[in-house]
Amino acid sequence: MTTTLLTEDQQALVETTLDFAQDHLAPRALDWDRDKHFPVDVLRKAAGLGLGGVYVREEYGGSGLSRADGVLVFESLASGCPSIAGYLSIHNMVAWMIDRYGADTQRERWLPRLCAMEDLASYCLTEPGAGSDAAALTTRAVRDGDEYVLTGVKQFISGAGASQVYVVMARTGGTGADGVSAFIVDKDDPGLTFGPNERKMGWNAQPTRQVVLDGVRLPADRLLGREGEGFRIAMNGLNGGRLGIAACSLGGARSALDRSLAHLADREAFGTRLLDAQALRFRLADMATELAAARALVQQAAQALDRGDPQAPYLCAMAKRFATDTGYSVADRALQLHGGYGYLSEYGIEKIVRDLRVHQILEGTNEIMRVIVARGLTEALG
């Protein structure tokens, strides 16, 4: 990562997070992937560095960092393990949503434990029949006196079963986005259960399950924000979440590029180092250039989100699409540069490829990112 344009505080943040990734994530990432192990103990060590509440205000135990700082954090973490970095991005998205939209009593109750990662968090929007068309969700929340009763199923939920806190989008009104509200659900609430851990291509170091709400009865003070605001809350959370996943793609791809440099420097063919072959050097140059361009776009979008720029959602979608496509492409080319060794699990390249592939799907598919970007372009025409 180029650090010449970073402040001293940002350089220190990158160095600290990189050290954590290399000391605590990278050495065990392959084992976690193989064993499908979710290292909660390591997540709590990350919280000791302030990574459990990256964007949360300090008064509630957070680090109070900007989005421009956050993308540096998640890129650095992903250099050690994209799967764990990806989960941390989601956890932080949920913590930010509670900090941004919650009442004081909700912040006081939930945020200190989330920031310490004594409690983990999951984001529940997608359903079996409502993926990209999230406004069509059918999970319902029916008001019953001083309570809400939630019924429905959420699909592809990262951290499900291990997380204690779930921000759930449910329909309190009519069809469409205006009928959606957001709720804070606790793992111990009666009627909340989980499907089996999904068998996945990548991201095996974190669980992915259905979240099943069978008449989950919540006190009315679990409503996050106001009735009908849930879809807006969900989308605003995703603006930051998309930047986190984009940054994770950069970190994973950067690790793949670094490994490729070392591999080509170490290997010989036809009496010369592979690194001295011009064709291969050009490939490396292209990979580095594309990552630098993607990083600049992610940073631009993060700065726009920090200053409340109306174009921020458009830029976040653009950055997510470009960075996740670029990250996967760079990792795939890194595998090719390793030849047969890249296909072996022990070298770690194929894991990066598998992990980064899902980044083009989650937090809004890249096809939906194109819809958002195109809408921004056409709306400017009036």
Image (cartoon, rainbow, N blue to C red):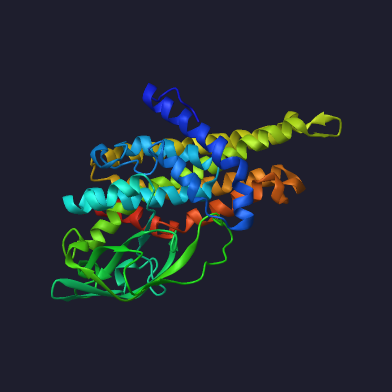
Q: Nearer the viewer, residue 142 or 3?
A: 142
Q: Position of residue 119 (x, y in %)?
A: 37, 53
Q: Quadrant of the C terminus?
A: bottom left
Residue visible at 27% across and 69% down?
Answer: 170
Give the residue at the far left of this rendering.
Answer: 145
- State whether residue 371 is above or below residue 13: below
Q: Position of residue 141 (x, y in %)?
A: 24, 73
Q: Nearer the viewer, residue 169 or 39?
A: 39
Residue 20 placement, left or right of 182: right
Residue visible at 41% across and 48% down?
Answer: 89
Residue 307 visible at all: no
Residue visible at 51% across and 42% down?
Answer: 78
- State whether residue 53 is above or below residue 282: below
Q: Position of residue 33 (x, y in %)?
A: 60, 54
Give the residue at the far right of this rendering.
Answer: 271
- State whether residue 365 is above or below residue 248: below
Count the marks: 0
Q: Position of residue 275 (x, y in %)?
A: 73, 31
Residue 272 visible at all: yes
Q: Quadrant of residue 174?
A: bottom left
Residue 16 placement, left or right of 62: right
- State whether residue 195 is above or below residue 6: below
Q: Quadrant of residue 67?
A: top left
